[in-house]
Amino acid sequence: MGEKVLHIDPQKCTGCMQCEGVCAVWCSASGNPSVSRIRVLKWEGSLFVPMACRQCEEAPCMAVCPKEALYRDGALNRVMVDYTRCISCRMCVAACPFGAMGFDAGRQRVFKCDLCDGDPRCVRFCLPGALSYTASETVQYRRIRHAAQKQAPIKEATHVLLSSE
Amino acid sequence: MESSGTIGYIDLSRPETAVTPMPSQWRSRFLGGRTLNAYLAFRNTPKGSGPLDPGNSIVLGSGILSGLGATLLECAGFSSRFPLTGRFGFAAIPGGFGAGMRRAGFDHLVISGRAGQWVYLLLHEGQVQVLEAFDLKGKTVPETLEALEKKHATPDFQALVIGASGENRVHFAEGATREGWTFGKTGAGALLGAKKVKAVVCCGTRDLWVKSPGAFLDLVKSLYDEGAAAGALGSVLKRKGDGEDLFFRLCRDLGVNPETARKMRSWAQSLAESGVLSKNVSGRLGVMGNGEGDFMPFVRRMARRKGAGVAWQWGPLAAAERLPKGSLAYFPSLDALFKVYCEPCFEPLLARPWTDCLPDVLSHEGRAFDSHAVDDAKKGRAFRRVKGRRLPALTAEAFIANSLGIGTLRLPGGTTGKAALSVYRDLVRLATGFQFREKRLVEIAFSGYALERLLDIREAKGGSMPRWVFRSMDGESARALGGPREVKAWIPPKAVLQGWEKASLVKRKVFRQLGIEAIWPLMR
């Protein structure tokens, strides 16, 4: 089994915002979603899209950091912040294409998702199952299954057609 | 305890705003949420104010657990004298509005007066602003939310808005939140509309510190797990709008309660078919036909207060007074009639919305809508007592939970009783560090109940809603709804023995016992 990834399925998200709340409380002891590492965005109708750090392989935040304060933790394949080196210049915040790097004005330091050391709290509390922390192969397999399920009726119809011939 | 909190006062008639710190004794005496809402309403509502009068205050309130991470359980409160029932009541606002209020720097907001033109209120970083809302007038609920979200493009945006029916003061117009929750089916929308307030918006990023984050989240998770295992989290996890038909969506857009609107439409159709309504009126109302599309014109006319739809906007009883005698007999059923006048409570762990309506009567022993009260009665905990007064356990717990800023924590297995009280106490202790005895929680519930009841006694001269309902029905209607005896059965004779009737309650020593002596002069 390969590395685990935080997988987000917006189709299952109900917009309950529990992930935001629990992340902010767990990571900052504050019920303030602006310091949450995961944010849920609402689009027209009732579509909600949770957004969190993708732990990119070629991470732009790492590339722009002038003090090399961002580094990859091999054990969980995540990007981490070394606060002893960080000078809070916020270059990483500007560089992240997903807006997953944040800045905590109260503590004057940047923050990002650290996957709660392998047990993401947002996943634990996500009751609709929109968030999962799972092996990357499983994510692909789920998609394949979903696509195959859609094709099942076609197969059935073909079978009926052939047998009638 | 971290802080006592802040209260905002807005007088829309002048307009004037004031922000004051909450006295610490209010926090310890009333906790917050529902109970403090009732106390603030008492202090700020002049005697004799009708529900839609400028004097009638609306109090919005969060609780001490709002915005601390138990998101699925949270609800803010909307307290006022509601137009449909004429009673002082409380409507739970599920979702993040309470958290938004606290992050914007407010625990409670008292709105009084009436604005000269359409406005919306912006709560931002401890300040209240009254802003013009010309461009929002006439917009539907989703359109209003979208326009406000564009205007205040912050990630911490929270809002409650009303639709066209609220603007037109339809008595069963409700409010809606950003997440798609609706609240106040007995006229919260009309109350905001009467004050010409189209929306209340919160934008703020204040920190709300949690004392013991790990332990608090563990306790919350165990509650979720219990709820999920019992299959009782359906209502809070359902994506809003899923599976709703066209009629439901139209009602949501207009901000009118769909169940009440549907019942009113069915009633109008029955009246048209039986010839009680003339063909001319039926034609103008557009009530003939059973298709989904046939329901639309009636609701649109009613919500937009147009033509023949005007008479129907006050609810079935008031409409019956204007219709030919005996027309109430065609209402779907007595049960349906009472549900129109009941404010549902928010029970996140159990989708069972009809328990807390008219708490002094319907959750009374043997008269409850739900079977839990009977189970609890067997276990000997159907009632809670303080100084000789009794309150149904369900009602006491609803008051405690709503005063904390959450919904009632009840599960299909029935956790009413000591277990539930200890859960409430532990949630507060872990989240805020505030320690108190379980008995204190019950006393707070009794104070809250007394405050709401006293406001009713002061404004409605002691008449409870069911008695008033019965008076509104003529003998023929009552017989058609199951007979006068059945209607009378809704008024349990024991209700007056609980110590909540005027003669037992309006005494200075009782006010002192319940910790609400400060309002004694306001009672007169």
Image (tube, rainbow, N blue to C red):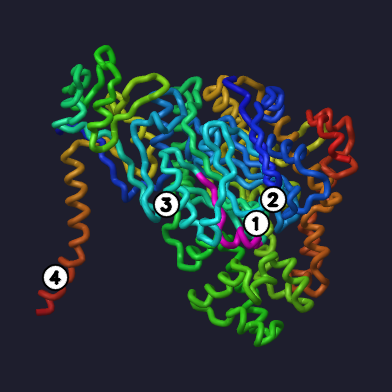
Say which of marks 3 and 1 sits in front.
Answer: 1
Does mark 1 fall on the same chain as mark 2? yes
Q: Amino acid at mark 1?
A: Ala
As drawn, is B359 to the left or to the right of B290?
Answer: right
Classify mark 3: residues with Cα within 10 Å, few (<14), some (14-19) or many (20+): many
Is the N terminus of chain B in the top left, top right, bottom left or bottom right quadrant? Answer: top right
User: Is residue A45 shown in magenta?
Assistant: no
Residue identified by numbered label 2: B114
Sequence-earlier tag: 3 or 1: 1
Q: Amino acid at mark 2?
A: Arg
Say which of marks 4 and 2 sits in front.
Answer: 2
As drawn, is B459 to the left or to the right of A147?
Answer: right
Sequence-earlier tag: 2 or 1: 2
Residue at figure coordinates x 66%, y 40% from the top left: B10
Distance CA(mark 4)–CA(mark 2): 70 Å
Q: Foreground residue, B372 or B472?
A: B472
Q: Chain of mark 4?
A: A
Residue identified by numbered label 1: B190
Q: Which residues are magenta?
A: B159-170
Q: SS for tag 3? A: loop
Residue identified by numbered label 4: A159
Q: Foreground residue, B495 or B51?
A: B51
Above or below — where is A95 with respect to B170? above
Q: SS for tag 1? A: helix
Q: Amino acid at mark 3?
A: Arg
Whether label 4 touches label 1, CB < 8 Å: no
Residue identified by numbered label 3: B239
Distance CA(mark 3)–CA(mark 1): 26 Å
User: Is residue B164 shown in magenta?
Assistant: yes
Q: Chain of mark 3?
A: B
